[in-house]
Amino acid sequence: MEARFYIEAGQPKVMIDGEWNALSLFLESDSSFSEAVRHIELKKQRRWIGNTSVLHLVSGSKFEVSTELDLELKKVDIYQNQLLALIGAWREFEKKREPHVVNV
């Protein structure tokens, strides 16, 4: 999975595998919530609903990231370690604001 971090109109943005999807929305809006990170780390069974995103444990350590705001926005299945790595990369990008690509 490739995440391209870039600046658009002065705002940090991320494209996942060449598209803006539910995971992009989650990283840009809800990944800053410590409750979301704890939910992922503990692999909680119930859904976590943020301002724009929904996290749901599908099985084992695989999560589904979706949104109820735009039903046409593509859902993304991602493993726990990949999701936590992307959250960490997003936080670093927000601080440094240097465009780059991360593969997880």
Image (cartoon, rainbow, N blue to C red):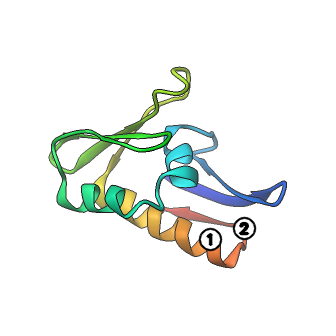
- Visible in this render: residue 82? no
Percent x, y of residue 22: 50, 38
* Mark 2 Cα shell of 10 Å, populated few (<14), some (14-19), many (≥20): few
Q: Quadrant of residue 33?
A: bottom left
Is 25 left or right of 99, judged from the image as shown? left
Q: Dots 1 and 2: beta carbons under 8 Å?
A: no
Residue drawn at 51 percent across, 21 percent down: 71
Percent x, y of residue 63: 29, 44
Task: Work out whether residue 63 or residue 94 is closer to the camera in this orientation and state it.
Answer: 94
Is 84 left or right of 26, judged from the image as shown? left
* Residue found at the very far front of the displayed protein: 51
* Residue found at the very far bottom of the displayed protein: 96
The kind of residue on which mark 2 rests is Pro
Instruction: Kindly report the distance in space between the C-alpha atoms of the residues bearing marks 1 and 2.
Output: 8 Å
**As displayed, is residue 100 above or below residue 70?**
below
- Visible in this render: residue 57? yes
The kind of residue on which mark 1 rests is Phe
Q: Quadrant of residue 54?
A: top left
Comparing labels 1 and 2, the label whose residue is closer to the camera? 1
**As displayed, is residue 86 above or below residue 76?**
below
Residue drawn at 84 percent across, 54 percent down: 9
Sequence-first tag of 1 and 2 = 1
Residue position marked by numbered label 2 in the rendering? 99
Task: Work out whether residue 2 or residue 10 is closer to the camera in this orientation and state it.
Answer: 10
Task: Work out whether residue 55 or residue 52 is closer to the camera in this orientation and state it.
Answer: 52
Residue drawn at 56 percent across, 37 percent down: 21
Tag 2, which secondary structure?
loop
Q: Specify the quadrant that holds the C terminus.
A: bottom left
* Mark 1 Cα shell of 10 Å, populated few (<14), some (14-19), many (≥20): some
Residue position marked by numbered label 1 in the rendering? 93
